[in-house]
C-alpha cells in the first residue's frame, strides 16, 4: 500500500501556497495519538467575530459533531445582534466519531465544554469536527489532554500546520487564499481543506475552513457561502459517495475595518464573493486532485441545458460514471460512454441535438460522430493529465461545470486491497 | 485481457439449463461477421401471438432500435383486437447502432423491412435490437445477407444457441425456464438474456427475451411485465450505468390452450406471474453474476423503510457505492460504508433506529455497533462468494431486495486497460 502515501501526481507543483495572515485568527496543532503518530488535532480561535457561516453534509446518518455544529450555528444566526465575541474550532483526524450513538454525542459535549472552559467561552461557541474511522468510540480523553498545549501554541502563522493536522490519508495539505481590494481597505481570505475521496479504512470526510478579516454581517455571509458551495464543493466528486461528516465553515473577524457588507449588491460585496469563490474553488479542486488513485484531473462543462439544475445533473452523471472514469484512466477517447451518461442523467436531452467535445476537439454533433473527428485526435488528447469534456445539449441556456478525477487501479488498491 | 474471456466464477455451475420448449416459437442463429467471428445474429419467430409485452431503457439517448420497438409495441397495444398472427425478433451483437443519427434509423428500417418481406409479415411485426459498439454505423448489409439462412434454420430447439449469439463479451450464455401447472393445463415459460455490466469497448446493453405458450391478453401481460421488471431487471446493477439499448420483451403464443388470462386476479394468473417472476429473476441475477470482474455475488435486503420506494433507494445506493463494492472485493466487513450509503440515499432514515447485518450476523443497531458483534465474525463472513447485506431502517413496512456484484481490479482492467 505504499502508493497510498505517495503525493498525488495532480498536486499543485508549487506545494502549499503562501496564505495571507488573517488577524484575529490563531491556530495550533498537537499530537493526541488518536490513530496517527503525527499531529492529529487542530484548534482555531476567532476573535473578534463579525460573522460565521457553515454548510454541512446532507447525509441522514450524519455525525454527532455535524448535528452539534448545525445547532450552534442556528443559535448564532437566530441572534445576530448578540454574536459571540470569540469562537473556537476544534478538529481531530483519525476517528470520525460517526455512528457511535449516545457515546458519540457525549464525546462532542465533553470536548466542546472543556475547550470552552479553557478558553473562557460559552460551550455554544465551540465547533468541533472529527474525521477518520467510523463506528469506533472516540477516545476523547486523548483530545482533552492536549487542550492546554494547543492553547499555549496558538499563533496566526499556523495555517499550513493546521492543514496537515486535519489530513487523514490525504497525500498533501490543501490551502488557498487571496486578498481582495475593497473601495476602502484590502480584505484577506485564507482557507484550508482536507479530503481525497473515501480512503480506506477512513471515511472520506471533506473538511474545509476559511477565515477572513472582512467585516460582513451574519446572514449575508451565510447566504454567500450556501450559494457558492453549490458551484464549488458540491461540484467536485471523487467517487460519488457522501461522507457522514462533511463540514465547511467560514469565519470572519471584521478586523479589515471595511465598511460592513450587509447585502450582496454592492461592488465590495461582489468583489468579496468572487474572492471567496476563488478560494473555495481552489480548495474543492485540490480535493479532486487528491482523489484516490487519481492520475487525471477532469473538468466537465455542460451548456445548452434547459436550466442549470439539468446541466448539473448531466455533469454529475458523467463525473460519477465508473465507465467514463475508467475510460479516462485508460486514455481511451470513449465518447460513447459520455453519451450513455448523458442519457441516464435524468435531465432533459435530445439525442439528435447533442454535441460532445474533448478539449477543443468536436467529437460528436447532431446525434452522431462529427465528420471532422478522427480517433487519433481523441487518443492524443486523452494522454493529457488535465482533461476537459464538453457537452452541449442544444436546448437552452442552462450550464454547469464539475470536476473529478479518473478511476484507476489505484482506487481499487486503496479501497479493496487491505484487511482491516 | 485474457481474464475477460474466462467464465465468471459466479456462473451457474450446472451450465445452461434445460429449458422447456415453447411451441410456436422458433429460433435460428447465423454468423454475419459484424465484429465477432462467431454467431452474432439471432432470429426468433412467434406464431401464433397471444400477447407481446416489452420494457425498454429510459435513457434519453436511446438507440434507434429501442425507439422503433417502442413505437411498434404501442401500435399493437392500441389495437388489441387485431394482434398480428406472427411476429419476429431480430437481434445482432457487435454493434449497438446507437448514436448513429439518421443512418441508424435507416438501418433499423431496412433490416425490419427485409425480414418482414422474407417472412411474409408486416414491417410493424418485426422487432430488432442491437448490442455492441456505440457510434459506429451498422453494416446492416451483413445482417440482411444472412436472413435467408436464418429462415431456413428456424427450429424450436435453439434457445441456447440464441443466448450465445446475442452475447457481446458476456462470459456465459444466460437462460431460465419453468413450467407452471394451471388449473386446466401446464404452461411453459423460457427465456434468454445477455449483459454483464458495461464491457469495453461495448456498451452494457441488457437484452432479455422470454417466450411462453400461455394464453393471455395483451394488456394483462404488459402490466405484469412492467410490474415485475421493477423487482427483477431494475433491481440488479453492475456499475450503475444505464445502457442506450436495454430491451426486455415477452411473447406469448397461447398454444398451451389454457383458459385465457384476462386479469391478474385469478389463481392461474397469480401462478403465471410467479413463474414469470422466477424466470425474470434468474435471468437478472445471472447478469449480475456475469458482472465485469465480479468475484462476489451480493444481495441487499432493506426492510423497515417508510415505503418500498425509499427501501429501493437505500438498496440501490448501497449496491452502486464504489466504496461498498470495493470493500466486498477486499473481503472487508466495512459496515461504516453501508451506513454512509444509507445516509446518502435520499431516503428517510434515522441514524439511531438503523440496524445492519451481514448474513445472520447483527453488525450494528440503534445507531452504533452491536454489542454482540465481533470483527472476526464479519471477516469470516466476507470470505464467502455470496454475500447478504441486510438493512432495517426501523421506520415502517417498506422493503426492497437488490442484487449486485463486487468491484475488483478485474473491472478496471476490463474497462481501462486497453486501447481501442
Image: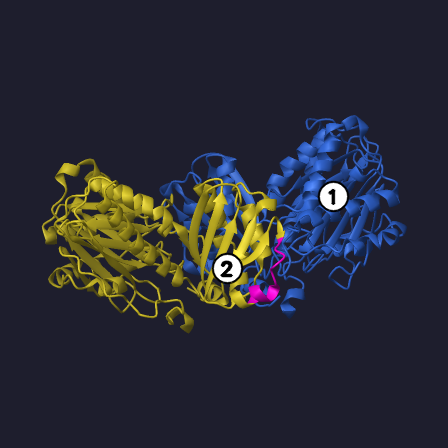
Chain colours: A blue, B yellow
**Label 2 element class:** loop
User: Which-is-in-front pick, marks 1 and 2?
Assistant: 2
Q: Which segment did they paint magenta?
A: B369-379
Which residue matches tag 1? A210
Q: Is residue B333 above or below residue A18?
A: below
Pointer 1 chain: A
Q: Is residue B162 left or right of residue A118?
A: left
Please indicate, yes or no, whether residue A209 appears anywhere in the rendered image: yes
Q: What is the crowding at mark 2: few (fewer than 14 residues within 10 Å), some, or many (at least 20)?
A: few
* C-alpha separation, residue under disc 1 versus residue under disc 2: 46 Å
Foreground: B104 or A38?
A: A38
Residue positioned most to the bottom = B2
Q: Is residue B14 magenta?
A: no
Q: Residue, x 33% and y 62% (percent of image)?
A: B168
Residue positioned most to the right = A152
Which residue matches tag 2? B360
Residue B114: x, y in percent? 15, 52
Residue A371: x, y in percent? 37, 51
Task: Using the rendered view, name the quadrant where residue A39 is placed.
Answer: bottom right
Q: Give the quarter of the figure containing the N terminus of chain B.
A: bottom left
Please indicate, yes or no, whether residue A363 appears anywhere in the rendered image: no
Q: Residue, x 68% and y 41% (percent of image)?
A: A67
Amino acid at each position: 500500500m505504499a502508493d497510498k502515501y505517495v503525493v498525488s501526481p495532480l498536486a499543485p507543483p508549487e506545494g502549499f501556497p503562501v496564505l495571507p495572515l488573517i488577524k484575529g485568527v490563531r491556530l495550533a496543532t498537537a499530537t493526541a495519538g488518536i490513530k496517527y503518530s503525527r499531529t492529529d488535532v487542530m484548534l482555531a480561535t476567532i476573535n473578534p467575530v463579525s460573522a460565521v457561516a457553515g454548510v454541512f453534509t446532507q447525509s441522514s446518518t450524519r455525525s454527532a459533531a455535524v448535528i452539534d455544529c448545525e445547532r450552534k450555528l442556528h443559535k448564532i444566526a437566530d441572534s445576530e445582534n448578540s454574536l459571540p465575541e470569540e469562537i473556537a474550532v476544534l478538529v481531530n483526524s483519525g476517528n470520525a466519531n460517526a455512528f457511535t450513538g449516545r457515546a458519540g454525542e457525549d464525546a462532542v459535549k465533553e470536548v466542546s465544554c472543556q475547550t470552552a472552559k479553557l478558553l473562557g467561552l460559552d460551550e455554544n461557541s465551540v465547533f468541533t469536527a472529527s474525521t477518520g474511522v467510523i463506528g469506533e468510540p472516540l477516545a476523547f480523553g486523548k483530545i482533552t489532554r492536549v487542550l492546554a498545549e494547543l492553547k499555549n501554541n496558538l499563533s496566526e502563522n499556523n495555517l499550513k500546520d493546521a492543514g496537515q493536522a486535519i489530513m487523514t490519508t490525504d497525500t498533501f495539505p490543501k490551502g488557498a487564499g487571496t486578498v481582495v481590494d475593497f473601495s476602502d481597505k484590502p480584505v484577506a481570505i485564507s482557507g484550508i481543506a482536507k479530503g481525497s475521496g473515501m480512503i480506506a479504512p477512513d471515511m472520506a470526510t471533506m473538511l474545509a475552513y476559511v477565515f477572513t478579516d472582512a467585516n460582513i454581517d451574519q446572514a449575508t455571509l451565510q447566504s454567500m457561502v450556501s450559494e457558492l458551495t453549490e458551484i464549488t464543493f458540491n461540484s467536485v466528486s471523487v467517487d460519488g459517495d457522501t461522507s457522514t461528516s462533511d463540514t465547511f465553515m467560514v469565519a470572519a473577524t471584521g478586523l479589515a475595518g471595511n465598511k460592513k457588507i450587509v447585502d450582496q449588491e454592492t461592488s465590495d460585496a461582489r468583489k468579496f464573493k468572487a474572492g471567496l469563490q476563488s478560494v473555495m474553488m481552489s480548495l474543492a479542486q485540490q480535493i479532486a486532485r487528491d482523489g484516490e488513485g487519481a492520475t487525471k484531473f477532469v473538468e466537465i462543462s455542460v451548456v445548452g441545458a434547459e436550466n442549470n439544475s439539468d446541466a448539473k445533473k448531466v455533469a454529475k452523471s458523467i463525473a460519477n460514471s465508473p465507465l467514463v472514469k475508467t475510460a479516462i484512466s485508460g486514455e481511451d477517447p470513449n465518447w460513447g460512454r459520455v453519451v450513455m451518461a448523458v442519457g441516464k442523467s435524468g435531465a432533459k436531452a435530445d439525442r439528435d441535438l447533442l454535441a460532445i467535445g474533448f478539449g477543443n476537439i468536436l467529437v460528436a454533433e447532431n446525434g452522431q460522430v462529427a465528420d471532422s473527428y478522427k480517433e487519433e485526435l481523441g487518443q492524443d488528447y486523452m494522454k493529457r493529465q488535465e482533461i476537459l469534456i464538453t457537452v452541449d445539449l442544444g436546448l437552452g441556456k442552462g450550464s454547469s461545470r464539475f470536476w473529478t478525477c479518473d478511476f484507476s487501479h489505484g482506487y481499487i488498491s486503496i479501497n479493496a486491497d487491505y484487511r482491516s
